[in-house]
Amino acid sequence: MKHLLSIADLDRESLLRLLDAAEGHLALQDERVKKRDHLRGRTVINLFFEDSTRTRSSFEIAGKWLGADTINIAAKGSSVSKGESLRDTVATIAAMGVDALVVRHPASGAPAQIARWLDAQGRRASVVNAGDGTHEHPTQALLDAFTLRRALGELEGRHVAIVGDVTHSRVARSNLIALRTLGARVTVVAPATLMPSGAAAWAARDGFALSHELDAVLPTVDAAMMLRVQSERMAGGYFPTPREYTVVNGLTRDRLAALPEHAVICHPGPMNRGLEISPEAADDARSRVLDQVSAGVAVRMAVLDTLMNDPHHTDGVQA
Ligand code: CP
């Protein structure tokens, strides 16, 4: 595999292989000397056109722990702010001999377009989608699956509710694919106004359930995956209002009692505490939010190692 653009690029076997590889990398976090040399001499560029705390820093740490040189480029502070096009920006960076580009962009499909341009130029660089618009966030789905598997065991038959602003959520889209690939039962829970149009046909095709009733679903789950309300993608405001949203769809302190004792709470971050998740839920013993962050480093190490140690990189032949 040269690029990771969608979680659908991974069949069940490759997905499980990445999760297993990440298990080995997770142990590094407790070691005093963390550097390895799997990617010594390689260069990874994080090219971020949207803000990020978790994804950008964990890719940077992942690259560094594997021995690569990692460099961060943000749209602000680059020649993009002078009007340079995406194509010219990418061609310029690739001409410096980079081995991997980790890309976050507000436009759905931008990382895939970048991969096509680089392939057409015969560049060896791998492209990793670090979140594109409302489309996908494949490494988030990997770290979520990793976290759930550590908490619950194998995911076959486990019931996961993905709850919230599904319309704008690339996390939901990637997680749906990953969880179904791993055999989990998934229910998508959202107010009608934040459920994407065509959701019924999508659910029928991909084999998951839809609900607008969080209170009915919550007692039946093994995991509640709360989504961030993405108000920055709702320029005209949104309905329900924040207060209504919390009442109808928030994981409030009162709703925590309905969540089974063995179940876990996930959130990709950043959290809107008091909106989609209460402080009590975020800090509950069942919350795995910080485990997700730790998993992010391990999973991204597995992804970078796998992509860059693929034969197309080591033998110098373009894929
Ligand atoms: N979950 C996630 O993508 O977080 P960041 O925006 O902080 O990277």
Image (cartoon, rainbow, N blue to C red):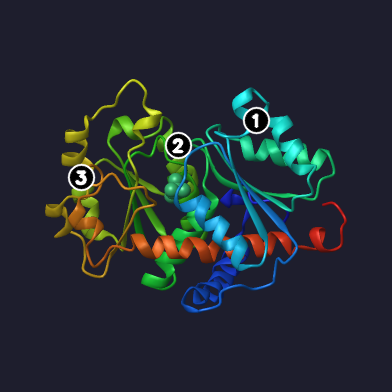
Question: Which residue appears at 42% of the width and 60% of the height?
Answer: 293
Question: Which residue appears at 62% of the width and 61% of the height?
Answer: 63
User: Label 3 near label 2: C-beta < 8 Å?
Assistant: no
The secondary structure type at the circle numbered 2 is: helix
Give residue 294's quadrant in the image: bottom left
The secondary structure type at the circle numbered 1 is: helix
Q: Nearer the viewer, mark 3 or mark 1?
A: 1
State which quarter of the image contains the N terminus.
bottom right
| Residue 274: mark | 3
Q: Amino acid at mark 3?
A: Gly
Quick one: label 2, few (<14), some, or many (20+) residues within 10 Å? few
Question: Which residue appears at 54% of the width and 68% of the height?
Answer: 19
Q: Amino acid at mark 1?
A: Ser
Q: Against 304, is 173 above or below?
A: above
- Residue 49 at least partly seen: yes
Q: Earlier in the sequence, mark 2 or mark 3?
A: 2
- Spatial separation of the CA atoms under disc 2 and disc 1: 43 Å
Quick one: label 3, few (<14), some, or many (20+) residues within 10 Å? some
User: Label 1 near label 2: C-beta < 8 Å?
Assistant: no
Q: Nearer the viewer, mark 2 or mark 1?
A: 1
| Residue 79: mark | 1
| Residue 22 percent location from the top left of the image | 55, 69
Residue situated furthest left in the rendering: 254
- Spatial separation of the CA atoms under disc 3 and disc 1: 38 Å
Q: Is the residue at mark 1 in contact range of ligand 1, meaning its CB lies under 8 Å from it?
A: no
- Spatial separation of the CA atoms under disc 2 and disc 3: 32 Å
